[in-house]
Amino acid sequence: MRITVFTSNLRRHASLIEALSTIADNVFAIQEVTTLFPGSVEDFYKKSPIMQEYFQRVTDAEERIFSTPSVLPRNVRSFPIRMGDLNRIPPEWLKECLQSDLYVVFGASFIKAPLIDLLLERNAINIHIGVSPFYRGSSCNFWAMHDNKSEYVGATIHRLARGLDSGPILFHAFPVYNGESPFEFTMKAVKSAHQALIPRIVDGSILTMKPHVQNKSFELRYSRRDEFTDNIAAEFLKRETNAADVTRQLSRRILSDFIEPVLVP
């Protein structure tokens, strides 16, 4: 099996590549590169003391959930590009990468024509870290925690579509809560998506699952990256969200409200 993944270069993205490499003969990884030190280095997010503190917490949680960065496996062929360059690349540059059996998008920038047309033809799958259609856009699990709606911390595996996080849903994945900090809990949501997806690729069911059109009337928040400001980050860092709060919020979750929900320990 050949799998192509459009993703980024942080530890959580590398972890998906590694997981796919264990079930595929070859993995083609188109990686949009950003700094490994958000908040400390001006890049996708601005540099500031608050952002540095916030993203240090994110990085610490990522290392606890996914371990430290490592060299990619030998059956992975990586094509690193700068974040934002994906839509500038002529499709012929990716010719070999576009001859796979399965296509996965996770953490890539918004994909436009002509690449989106090719991926739609190939029934590409998108991993959205957030629970669509309730939370769509940027940093969805952060905003679910911010809104005191931990029941919507999770991930959505859906067919890729032209609209952001709007494709027909295949299933939702949720992490089991064991008293983790908000940063670790939301990072576990990422891992739950990976762990739920891999066996469905192996048994082939990911290709036969019924896609469910999203009901956009259920949307609670559509978040943009520029809404995540120093003030918002500072307020969240000062908030004392404890295990009792999260447990109470999770008790409101009704699994039948979601598509083929998977709970991952």
Image (tube, helix red, strand yellow):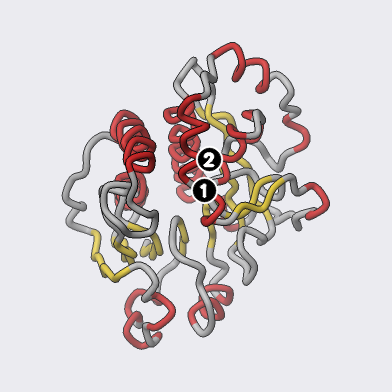
Which residue is rendered at x = 54% and y = 20% of the image? Answer: 241
Quick check: marks 1 and 2 in contact, CB under 8 Å? yes
Which residue is rendered at x = 31% and y = 36% of the image? Answer: 56
Which of these two is toward me, 216 or 6? 216
Position of 70 compared to 204: left or right?
left
The extreme right residue here reads 217
The dot on residue 232 is 2
Q: Is residue 107 visible?
A: yes
Q: Position of residue 210 (x, y in %)?
A: 70, 54
Q: Residues within 10 Å of mark 1 (few under 14, many from 20)?
A: some
- Does residue 227 lie above or below 104 as drawn? above
Q: Position of residue 252 (x, y in %)?
A: 74, 23
Which of these two is toward me, 239 or 252? 239
Position of 3 compared to 227: left or right?
left
Q: Disc 1 and disc 2: Cα gap in Å?
A: 6 Å
Q: Position of residue 37 (x, y in %)?
A: 26, 48
Q: Quadrant of the N terminus?
A: bottom left
* Helix, strand or loop at mark 2: helix
The residue where tag 1 is placed is 228
Q: Position of residue 18 (x, y in %)?
A: 29, 48
- Does residue 230 lie above or below 75 as drawn? above
Which residue is rendered at x = 58% and y = 64% of the image? Answer: 160
- Does residue 65 lie above or below 43 as drawn? above
The dot on residue 2 is none
Q: Quadrant of residue 195?
A: top left
Name the amino acid type tagged 2: Ile
Q: Residues within 10 Å of mark 2 (few under 14, many from 20)?
A: few
Q: Is residue 22 visible?
A: no
Name the amino acid type tagged 1: Phe
* Helix, strand or loop at mark 1: loop
